Amino acid sequence: MNAPLPVEVLKQHLIDPEICIRCNTCEETCPVDAITHDANNYVVDPDICNGCMACVPPCPTGSIDNWRLMLRNEAYSVQEQFGWEELPKEKALPQEAADDAAADDATGVDSGVATGAAPNAVSPAFSLPGASVPPWSAAHPYVNLYTHKAPMTATVVGNYRVTGADTESDIHHIVLDFGELPFPVLEGQSIGILPPGVDAQGRPHHARQYSLASPRDGERAGYNNLSLTVKRVTEDHGGAAAHGVCSNYLCDLAKNDTVQVIGPFGHTFLMPNHPRANLIMICTGTGSAPMRAMTERYRRRIDTGDNGRLMLFFGARTERELPYFGPLMKLPRDFIDINLALSREPGQPKRYVQDLIRERAAQVCELLGDRNTCIYVCGLKGMEVGVLDALREVTMQSGQDWSILHDVLRREGRLHFETY
Ligand code: A2P
């Protein structure tokens, strides 16, 4: 008997290159290394992806959540996906394969047709150091209102340096105004900036992502504007000379220049909205942007008496290289508990944020014991491990089981990382 061979159908995972902001979150999150990128696109290898979904919640744009039913032997290769400017149109499956796939979807049974998550799929909840959901009371964020194809034009209304002029860290506070156009944002969200010009292949530059440094009601309360904290990039991670395309463009902007903006992005790194929520904020350098936004939100309602506690751990090389040092020092001490970790201050021992978390163990544990406390970590990738180790150590010392608390914090959207 010549029975027909089963047709293998794949639910192929694809990334929409028109929406993707190349933030690398998916590649970092993927537990099986199925996601990779070149200078053009982030792509998913159909031979490795097991459909575990771990990468989907952390994606700030939703560009990761694209799926196509394909014959497995016709799946789009990594090389094909690298060349895309947009997703290809859906292809109809041969009738027999479409029927099989529909039957599988209806029964939830995998009969050799790979349409769903593979058996070795991991739980997304445990593949990330932080939460993939926002705190329960976070306000509803808008995302992707303006896209690569339809960006909006903002006007520069301020651009000034927020680090000592004599230091190597050239960090700017840049204020963008949206005029009459709506651009609703929340603290913790980011936007994309489209630098003018083309890359080495002659293609328009992709958007670069920057966290907001201002609260939802504007850099200046009641104005339709927002601010960014941008460090001029002059070297790569290895210390070799490198010219950051977008950071140099932004740091050199003058008042009244216009900028192409897309976004907003981000639906998890959001602050709680209920009164009396406490925030533990841990950051280095420009990772201070979302912390400034959240702190400013609290500062503007200081007179209501309805704020929870704020505890800040802020790492920089020296005081003069710490962005916003002056304004930060003017905040009342009973409003925010400020802990500065300086690593290269002459005459002082080198300290990182994780050292200070250990020094302030009692206060950190007290706050962690309150279910109204959320933790935000933003800045250098390298501090992620150090901060987690410090949190583990201080909670264990106080007799708590960190692995249980860690899972609770992630499940309840109370521990968030944004590192780069
Ligand atoms: P370091 O002096 O060792 O570079 P940057 O100025 O490069 O943005 O860094 C901000 C601060 O973060 C600096 O004080 C830097 O110290 C510190 N830092 C570097 N690596 C880590 C790490 N793994 N954990 C915590 N802080 C770090």
Image (spheres, rainbow, N blue to C red):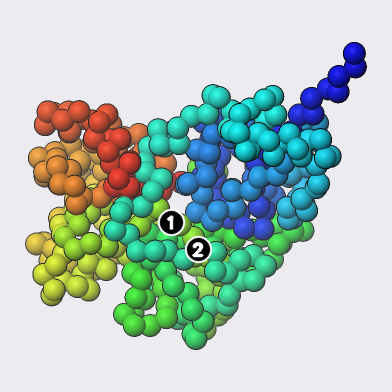
Taking the image as drawn, is residue 229 in sight?
Answer: no
Taking the image as drawn, is residue 87 in sight?
Answer: yes
Q: Position of residue 170 (x, y in %)?
A: 42, 61
Q: Quadrant of residue 361?
A: top left
Q: Amino acid at mark 1?
A: His
Hey, which residue is sitting farthest bottom in the picture?
A: 180
State whether residue 31 is above or below residue 23: above
SS state under label 1: loop
State whether residue 46 is above or below residue 375: above
Q: Amino acid at mark 2?
A: Val
Mark 1 surroundings within 10 Å by alpha-carbon count, few (fewer than 14), some (14 through 19), many (20 or more): many
Tag 1 near tag 2, CB within 8 Å: yes
State whether residue 295 is above or below residue 40: below
Label whose residue precedes the other's in the sequence (1 or 2)? 2
Task: Name which residue lies at 62% across and 38% down.
Answer: 106
State whether residue 190 is above or below residue 407: below
Locate residue 181 relative to residue 367 in the image: left or right: right
Residue in the foreground of this view, choosing between 122 and 34? 122
Q: Position of residue 352 (x, y in %)?
A: 27, 41
Task: Name which residue lies at 32% across and 47% down.
Answer: 413
- Residue 267: mark in rendering: 1
- Residue 143: mark in rendering: 2
Locate residue 45 relative to residue 58 in the image: left or right: right
Task: Name which residue lies at 66% across and 45% down.
Answer: 67
Locate residue 376 relative to residue 35 in the image: left or right: left
